[in-house]
C-alpha cells in the first residue's frame, strides 16, 4: 500500500521517467521553430502506446485511492452552521497530529471554504481524504500576541464561525464572548500558539493579520497526511470516527 507521499512519488516517477528515457537515447538540436495549435478533443484519437505505458501506474494509483482506512458512524456534513461535523473532525484531527510534533500548540484555525466536501457514513478511503483536502498545504505553528489572537476571535465571530479546535466561544452581535483557549479564559496580555496551514498563514481569506506572528514554524507535515494518520490511528485502536457537535462555537443572536 502507498502512503500519500509515495502516491505522489509514483506520479512524479512516471513523468520524470519518461523524460529520462528520452534524454538518454536521443540528442536534439534546435534548428528552427514554428507555431501550430492542436485541438485536444475526441478527434485526436487515443494513443494506445501511451495508454499501455501509464496503465500499470493508473491501476496502482486507483487501488491506493480506493483503499479503506477507516469508518465513520455517521455522515460528516458540511453546512453553513457555526459548528459542523466535518469542521470538528478536521480540526480535532490536525490538533491531535499537530500536538505530536509540537506539544505547545493550544488551538487551531481552518476555514469552511478550505474543506471541500463531506464524509459519507461508512467506509472512508484515501480518495475521500484527497477530496476533502485536495491541496498540498503544510501545517504551520504561529506564535501570536494576545492582540493578534483577538483578531482571530473577531474573524471567527464576524464570519459566524469557522472550523476550530482548542478554542470555545459564544458569538453575540458578531462579537466573540466567553472565549476559552486550551481550557482557560482568553487573556489578551498572553501569547498563544496557533496551528493552521501555510495557505492561511500567508494571509489568504482575509487573514492578513496572521503575518503579525512573532514566530512561525513549519512542523514538516502536510494537512492531508495528518488526516490520513489520524484516521489510521483510530482504526489501529479499533475505533471508528464518531465526531459529535460539542458546542465549541455557539451563536446566541
Image (cartoon, rainbow, N blue to C red):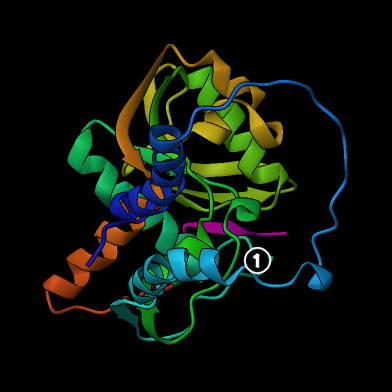
In the figure, is residue 191 to the left or right of 29? left
Residue at 31% from the left image edge and 40% from the top image edge: 221
Residue 65, above or below 211: below
**Which residue in the protein does label 1 denote?**
81
Q: Secondary structure at mark 1?
A: loop
On the rendered image, what quadrant is the C terminus found in? bottom right
Q: List x then y, in percent, for residue 93.
A: 34, 56
Indicate whether 246 appears above or below 188: below
Report the side of 152 relative to 136 (left or right). Answer: right
Q: Nearer the viewer, residue 165 or 8?
A: 8
Please indicate whether residue 225 sits to the left or right of residue 203 in the image: left
Q: Quadrant of residue 91?
A: bottom left
Does residue 221 appear in the picture of this structure?
yes
Q: Residue 231 at x, y = what percent?
A: 28, 67
Q: Main secondary structure of the magenta part?
A: loop
For image coordinates 20% across by 70% down, the residue present is: 234
Where are the magenta residues, as a range? 246-253
Farthest top residue in view: 214
Which residue lies at the image location 35% right of the left edge and 50% below the top edge?
A: 94
User: Is residue 204 a member of the stretch shown in magenta?
Assistant: no
Q: Which percent across, then down, holds residue 138?
A: 42, 37
Q: Judge from the rendering whether residue 23 lies leftward or rightward of residue 201; answer left or right.
A: left
Q: Residue, x 35% and y 56% (percent of image)?
A: 7
Amino acid at each position: 500500500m502507498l502512503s500519500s507521499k509515495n502516491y505522489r512519488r509514483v506520479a512524479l516517477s512516471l513523468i520524470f521517467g519518461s523524460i529520462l528515457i528520452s534524454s538518454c537515447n536521443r540528442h536534439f538540436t534546435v534548428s528552427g521553430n514554428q507555431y501550430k495549435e492542436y485541438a485536444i478533443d475526441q478527434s485526436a484519437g487515443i494513443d494506445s502506446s501511451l495508454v499501455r505505458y501509464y496503465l500499470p501506474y493508473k491501476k496502482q494509483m486507483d487501488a491506493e485511492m480506493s483503499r479503506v482506512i477507516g469508518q465513520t458512524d455517521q455522515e460528516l456534513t458540511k453546512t453553513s452552521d457555526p459548528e459542523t461535523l466535518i469542521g470538528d473532525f478536521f480540526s480535532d484531527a490536525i490538533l491531535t497530529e499537530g500536538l505530536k510534533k509540537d506539544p505547545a500548540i493550544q488551538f487551531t484555525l481552518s476555514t469552511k471554504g478550505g474543506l471541500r466536501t463531506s464524509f459519507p457514513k461508512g467506509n472512508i478511503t484515501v480518495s475521500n481524504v484527497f477530496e476533502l483536502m485536495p491541496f498540498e498545504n503544510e501545517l504551520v505553528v504561529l506564535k501570536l500576541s494576545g492582540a493578534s489572537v483577538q483578531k482571530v476571535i473577531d474573524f471567527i465571530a464576524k464570519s459566524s464561525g469557522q472550523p476550530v479546535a482548542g478554542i470555545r466561544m459564544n458569538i453575540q452581535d458578531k462579537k466573540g464572548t466567553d472565549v476559552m483557549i486550551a481550557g482557560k479564559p482568553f487573556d489578551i496580555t498572553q501569547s498563544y500558539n496557533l496551528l493552521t496551514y501555510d495557505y492561511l498563514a500567508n494571509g489568504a481569506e482575509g487573514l492578513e493579520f496572521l503575518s503579525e506572528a512573532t514566530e512561525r514554524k513549519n512542523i514538516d507535515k502536510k494537512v492531508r497526511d495528518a488526516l490520513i494518520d489520524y484516521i489510521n490511528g483510530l482504526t489501529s485502536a479499533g475505533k471508528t470516527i464518531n465526531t459529535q457537535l460539542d458546542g465549541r462555537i455557539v451563536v446566541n443572536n
